[in-house]
Amino acid sequence: MAGLLAPDKGEVYICGKMRKGLISDEGSLGLRIGLVFQSAALFDSLSVRENVGFMLYEHSTLSPQRISELVTESLAAVGLKGVENRYPSELSGGMKKRVALARAIISDESQEVREPEVVMYDEPTAGLDPIASTVVEDLIRSVHIKGRDARNKPGNIASYIVVTHQHSTIRRAVDRLLFLHEGRILWEGTTAEFDTTTNPIVRQFVDGSLKGPIKY
């Protein structure tokens, strides 16, 4: 979906448009996708400001001053103020995740599509303690609120996908679930249905039981 790998077979449609290949086709697809990687994937040698504004510094026609302002806005949206000059080594695990989120949602005023229409999260709470996980889970919700987002601006990022195995993230950050098993979608439903399903594989995952069809 992100265009980092070409599908082996079949077709991928995003917002009704077919992705024909790799991310290099993004221009023809006309869709902007934001990515939040599991390990945050920040550049260690760059400051937080340079990390969050990386895409704009490299590809936009905006002035450095305007990019800096947009970076500050994006950081404020994830609850981080005054950290622009820090480096990744000076951040906690939870702060790194939030910086990665700020980078994914930053607005590009030089483009017709200013904000990503879809954000994809890869294990956004992996390695975090329960409190830090709750902060990130609530932020995922807040930046996708329709009407007005955390920056008190019209919220345009309506869709997001979360890859996770964390129960708290499943229950706090998403509305619908797709359960993958051995490379196939085994089950889908709402978070409420997730707790009451009788599917033996999903049930074993929900309960964390050693007894069931999944063997270790």
Image (cartoon, helix red, strand yellow):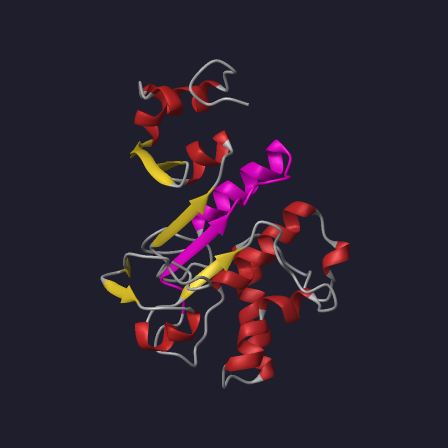
Farthest residue to the front: give it. 8
- Is 121 left or right of 27, judged from the image as shown? right
**Quarter of the image with the N terminus in it:** bottom left
Could you tell me which residue is drawn at 35 percent across and 61 percent down?
156
The total of numbered circles placed on residues is 0
- Is 80 left or right of 87, judged from the image as shown? left
Could you tell me which residue is drawn at 73 percent across and 63 percent down?
44
Pinpoint residue 166: horizontal percent, then vertical percent: 51, 33
In this view of the protein, which residue sits in the foreground, 203 or 40? 203
Visible in this render: residue 12?
Answer: yes
Residue 141 higher or lower than 102, as above or below = above
Farthest residue to the right: give it. 90
Task: Find residue 52 and report its image quarter.
Answer: bottom right
Visible in this render: residue 175?
Answer: no
Farthest residue to the top: give it. 211
Task: Find residue 153 and report its image quarter.
Answer: bottom left
Could you tell me which residue is drawn at 49 percent across and 86 percent down?
61
Residue 122 among those drawn in magenta: yes
- Is 111 left or right of 55, judged from the image as shown? left
Residue 62 higher or lower than 207, as above or below = below
**Quarter of the image with the C terminus in it:** top right
Residue 169 among those drawn in magenta: no
In this view of the protein, which residue sits in the foreground, 196 or 103? 196
Task: Find residue 172 and report its image quarter.
Answer: top left
Pinpoint residue 189: horizontal percent, then vertical percent: 29, 33
- Magenta residues (range): 115-142
Residue 59 higher or lower than 164, as above or below = below
Could you tell me which residue is drawn at 64 percent across and 34 percent down?
129
Pinpoint residue 74: horizontal percent, then vertical percent: 53, 63
Pinpoint residue 145: horizontal percent, then vertical percent: 37, 50
